[in-house]
Image: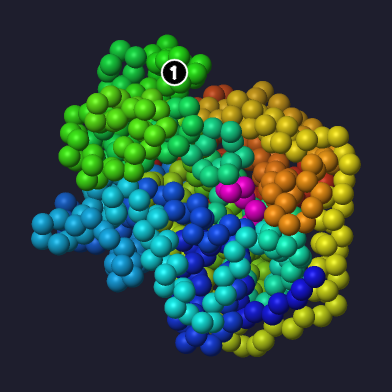
Amino acid sequence: MEVLEYDIVILGSGLAGMRAALQAAKASNDQLRIALVSKLHAMRSHSVSAEGGISGVLYSGQHGDSVDLHGYDTAKGSDFLGDQDAIELLVNHAPSEIKLFDHLGVPWNRDKSDKITLRAFGGMSVPRTAFAGDKTGFFMLSALYDSLLSFSNIKIFHEHIATKLIIEKKQFRGLVAMDMATGEMKAFVSNAGIIATGGFGRSYGFTTTSYSSTGDGHALAYEAGLPLKDMEFIQFHPTALIPSGILITEAARGEGAYLLNSDGKRFMENYAKSKMELAPRDIVSRSIITEIEAGRGIKDERFGDTEFVYLDMRHLGEAKINERLPNIKEIAIKMIGIDPSDAPLPVKPACHFTMGGIHTNIDGNVISGPKGVIVGLWAAGECGCVSVHGANRLGSNSLSECVIWGKITGNAAARLASKGRPVSDEVIKNTLAAEEKRIISMIESDGKENPYDIRRDLWRTMDAKVGVYRDAKALTEAVHEIGALQKRFAHIGLGDKGRVYNTNLKDTLEIWNMLLLSRAVAECALNRRESRGAHSRKEYPKRDDKNWLKHTIVTLGDDKNKITYGKVKITKWQPEERKY
């Protein structure tokens, strides 16, 4: 066991975590000791998978665009559940972040006059998404990683999986993590911590997210007694490649790709005539499922039993696909042997993004309960719920959120950390010893339950019963089934009894996190008796502002989670009927 003292500890190495580290280093003039802790090699964080781009009004007035219009689109896209003070912050700060990444070396696509090119995205009134081909996240994360390497006061701890937050009297004290390379348990002691661990999309079997997206930061906060917010709102991306679930970026539709049913018709004119394929993701996903359930889905034995629709981009031409969507072309050829220049791609909605997360205020401070915050603890990016996205995120707003709140929390952590050095004590040592004992007991357990069987059954439940369309019967069954899986988890046995690179142990820790969060999703979805954004209840097909214009707040309980509700902040844009 080892105790390490840092001024700031950042958990997670995606765009939010790295942006926070960069800002904290700059704000402190390189004087603060910063630990960036990642369960992966930092450059394998899921942010590298972001394809389409980042939103921001770079050229006010172009196509009639404005910061206010971006705000309105985001509030409307959220089905008016987004907190509008946070939305205003996002749209006002997004342009400067895009320019920062320009200076860091991101190779944005540019037009003939050397202006950054903006592409159309779903739910946006005008094109306002900057992009670097269809590998935007990779280029942005690479630029941040290269920048961090130039700071001697930033230490990156690759392949360290966090197992517990240390919080004492509503004050963050640090966290415990296991070094995968050695199996050694380490306590990172700090007065300032930022959780930036991304989403939990891997709680579903059919998902665009990587196997690392298991909601570790959410679960650590939840188990520490901290509330989560709006967990029922899961975004299903309309175009995941069959049968793998790999993302086919919304940028394909932004560039002009069509969605076709089994009759060869562009069916989106029946659901969102003015926006067609560029309606918000929740609307497009429901439209695809509706087409399939109406018998207009497509089957092809090459791709298994799953019904799907086609994404057709042949009319774009090979030259445009090669310029704007080269990664998609490479993925399609490698995965299913189809060149999108020659044939349409089979696609279907898949779990993609989690709008809910750790309950924070507008500054990213983690909220402790009805009163106050956890001093010294922030959450940024997909794991934190400020809430910008409300019930449905508009594509390309996620990267803006990650870097903006990365900057905000990095600044705040630096200010706090500059006031005093962290000190380890008996609380730290006792917590570390207890975690060491717990992890060893998991490794040595001789239970008969295979954790991978539990994960498989969780995926089946979430895919079948907590999907695009929901109803009380299925959600009730999901709550009971996940509860049963949690009981089975108490009897797991690990095949790998070693300490060095025990991926069996890592996977098992992640499976428990997914069970915790999945149960919260199902319970919160069962409670919300309306349809809003990505949460669509068959028994309650309409949005109900009178009773349900409110955030869901859930805290962990023994037998049943405690669910309460909080007010949505409305500043400029009053709720209206959501038409496209």
Q: Position of residue 310 (x, y in %)?
A: 34, 24
> What's the residue at 81%, 80% (across, down)?
425
Depicted 28 relative to depicted 74: above or below: below
Q: Amino acid at mark 1?
A: Arg
Q: Which residue is mark 1?
A: 302
Q: Position of residue 262 (x, y in %)?
A: 34, 14
Snapshot quadrant of residue 520 = top right
In the displayed structure image, the side of residue 482 where residue 359 appears, left or right? left
> What's the residue at 79%, 32% (across, down)?
484
In the displayed structure image, the side of residue 146 where residue 129 appears, left or right? left
- Tell me how the rendering is colored: rainbow
Q: Which region of the structure is painted magenta?
A: 212-217
Majority SS type along the magenta span: loop
Q: Position of residue 489 (x, y in %)?
A: 80, 39
Q: State the residue in front, 76 or 166.
A: 166
Depicted 427 relative to depicted 457: above or below: below
Q: State the residue in front, 206 or 499.
A: 499
Snapshot quadrant of residue 274 = top left
* Magenta highlight on residue 214: yes
Q: Can residue 198 be seen from the camera position used here?
A: yes
> What's the residue at 80%, 74% (across, down)?
428
Q: Secondary structure at mark 1?
A: helix
Q: Can residue 96 be seen from the camera position used here?
A: no
